Amino acid sequence: MDNESLFNEEVEPPGSLTEMVTPENNPSPVVIETLLHDSPIDLSGPKHRAPCVKSSRSRIFCKKFYPYTTNAEWNDWHWQLHKRIRDIHSLTRMFQLTEDERNALVRSTGPALPLSITPYYASLIDENNAAQALRRTVIPVIDEYFHAPGEAADPLSEDHDSPVPGIVHRYPDRVLFLVTDFCATNCRYCTRSRIVGGHHDLMKSGQWKKGIDYIASHPVVRDVLISGGDPLTLADEKLEWLLSRLRRIPHVEIIRIGTKIPVVMPQRITPELTRMLKRYHPLFMSIHATHPDELTPEMGQACTRLADAGIPLGSQTVLLYDINDSVETLKQLFLGLLKIRIRPYYLYQCDPIFGSSHFRTPVSKGLEMIQGLRGHTSGYAVPSYVIDAPGGGGKIPLLPDYVVGRDGDDLLLKNYEGQTYHYPDGPMILGEVH
C-alpha cells in the first residue's frame, strides 16, 4: 500500500459504523464496529493473529460468555476490538452489577467517557465483587458525576500548550503527539477523558501532517511521545506511516509510544507489529500498568515480544485510592513488571479531572508508598513519584524527607530504616598530599 494513500480519505479508529450482532449468532446483542472505513477486516486471515498463550482464566471466561468463539478469534486483536463491552446489557450478562453501578450506567447526562472493555480485560474482572481493584477502574459508579473543587476537564492545560491540533509542546526539547482519541479499554480516571471516545478529529485527513510539519519546523524537538487515546489501536500500516515520517526528521532522536494495549489487549502485540517497530529504533514504550492482577501470561508474552524486539519498556502507574495504594500491592506490581522486563518509571498522583475525587489519595499516601519501597526492595522497582502540576506546570517529582537537617558542616540523612547518618558537606579544603 502506498503510505500516502492512507490519508486520501478521512479515516478513524473504531467508532463510526455500527452493526448489531443478532441473537442467532451471539448469546446477547452487542455493538460491533468496523476498524477503519478504508480497511475492512478479514477475521479469517492469519495476519491479525499471533501464536498466543491463553490463560485458564481466559479459557473459562470465553467458554462461559463466548461459547461459539474459536481460539483463533479470541487471539485476533480485531475480534477483541469488535467485541468490546460498551453497554449495560452486556455488562449485566457478565457481572452482578450493584445499584451504584447500574445508576451510573443508565444516567443520561454526565461524564463524556464512554464505557469500553475488551473481552480479554473483562476476563480479569471479578464477576461478583464490585470492590475488586480492576473492576473499579473500568466500570463507572455514581461518584463520577460529582465534581469536587479544583477538578477540571483539562487540569494539565494541555489544550493551552497546543500550538497545532494534536501537538502539546510544554517542555523545551520534546512534544506530545496525540494521534487518536480511541482506546480499547477506557480507564475511568483517564486524564484525557475529554478526548477519549469523542470526536476530536485526531485522525482526519491531514491532521497528522500538520503535527509532523510542526515538529519538522522546530529543530529544538528531539523527543516525540506518541499518545492519544492509544496509538497501538491503529493498524500497522498507519502506525508505520507515522513512524516513518517522524524518522525522516533529522533532529528527532527518540520516539516513544504511550500505551495500555499490552495490558488490556495483549493479542495486539503480534510478530508483524514488533518486526515493523524494530525498523524505527531508538524506539521506547511506556506501558500503563495499574495492579498485579494485570500480570497475566498473555501480558507477559506480549511484553517479551516487545523486549525481544529491542524496545526498552517502562511503566507508568497512577496511584488510586483503595485500588493500589498499599506498599505490598505496588511492590508486587513493580517486581512483577521487572520480571517481564518493564522498568517501573513513574508513579503518578491521580490528576484532578472531573469526577475523580473517589480515585485520588492524599499526597502523603504517595510519599508513604515511596518510603515503603525505597531500601525495602530493588531500586529498579522504585519509580519516581510525580505530580503533573495542574495548570501546565509539568511533572514535579516528590520524595520523602530524607534530609533531616545539618550538624555543623555535616548533612543529616535518614535512611530507609529511619536511622540518621552524617555526610560531610562542608566547603572543600585543599590540604597537603600525604
Image (cartoon, rainbow, N blue to C red):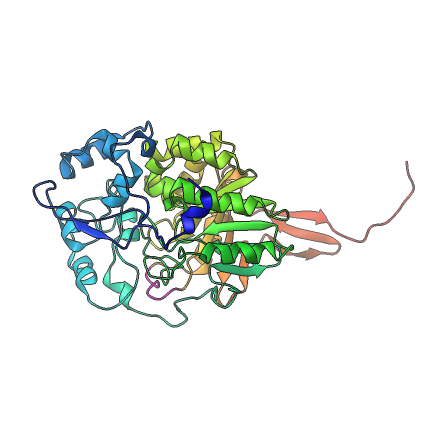
Magenta-colored span:
353-358
17 with respect to 337 (left or right): left
Q: Is residue 402 above or below residue 265?
A: below
Residue 39 picture location, percent across and down? 32, 44
Q: Quadrant of the C terminus?
A: top right
Residue 251 horizontal side relative to residue 434, left or right: left
Direction right: furthest residue:
432
The residue lying toward the viewer, choosing from 244 and 284, is 244
| Residue 235 found in image quarter | top left
Query: Does residue 45 sit above or below 166 in this rendering?
Result: above
Please identify the residue farthest to the bottom as the structure is shown.
149
Evaluate whether residue 315 shows in this view: no
Disc tally is 0
Let me know if residue 100 is in the magenta part.
Answer: no
Q: Position of residue 147 (x, y in %)?
A: 33, 70
Tell me where residue 173 appears, x and y as whole percent.
62, 55
Residue situated in front as seen by the camera: 68 or 380: 68
